[in-house]
Image: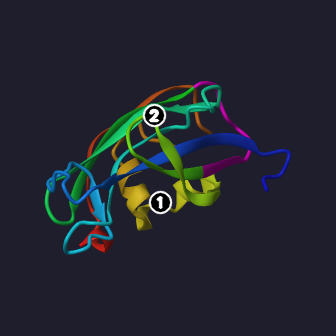
Amino acid sequence: MFRTSTSLFMVAAVHLIVIQPSGQYFFNGIKSGLDEDLKNSLFLSHIGQCRWQQDLSVFLGDMRIVQRSNTQYVVSGVFVVRRNLTGPIATAVKIEICQNETHCRPFVEPPVAVGDVCDFLRHKQNTSLGAILSYGIPPLVCPLQKGLYRVNDALVDYKPFR
């Protein structure tokens, strides 16, 4: 549980799409847990704001993930910091599995608490998410200032998805 003095930064929905055996094999997105016959394959296609969390301090629009090669992915998107944030900032990630954009159900319960965002940003170089955030324009630093931030074509070599 978050402390009462902690500002809630964002809750993001990570959409996983189940591909049926008859579905298209080449899909833009991270291929995770691929079975040889693709019967139970999951593809991460985008990251976006939870539908019921539209009024948070940070609005995460729609981060698109496109597969470039077996292990390389390109991530692009926009997020908006709606007000200056100076106190401790916490995040949570809710992961849903979706049949389409409107029919989703929880994939991981409860949501994953990330912890203090500023602490994460100070040590981000050692993570895949940190690599993505390093492509931010303007650079994402604490305290977070009100404004529009972009991630433009962040190239990530994500070896766990080989």
Element on which disc 1 rests: helix
Residues 11 and 16: in front is 16
- Residue 137 visible? The answer is no
Who's the residue at 21% across and 48% down the image? Answer: 28
Magenta span contains residue 108:
no
Who's the residue at 23% across and 73% down the image? Answer: 162
Name the residue beneath numbered marker 2.
Answer: 102
Residues 62 and 142: in front is 62
Residue 124: image tag: 1
* Image position of 113 (left or right of 59): right
Residue 39 in which image quadrant: bottom left
Magenta span contains residue 87:
yes
- Residue 128 visible? The answer is yes
Amino acid identity at mark 2: Thr
As drawn, 158 above or below 45: below
Residues 89 and 125: in front is 89
Query: How far across and down, in percent of the image, does residue 142 sit?
Result: 59, 43
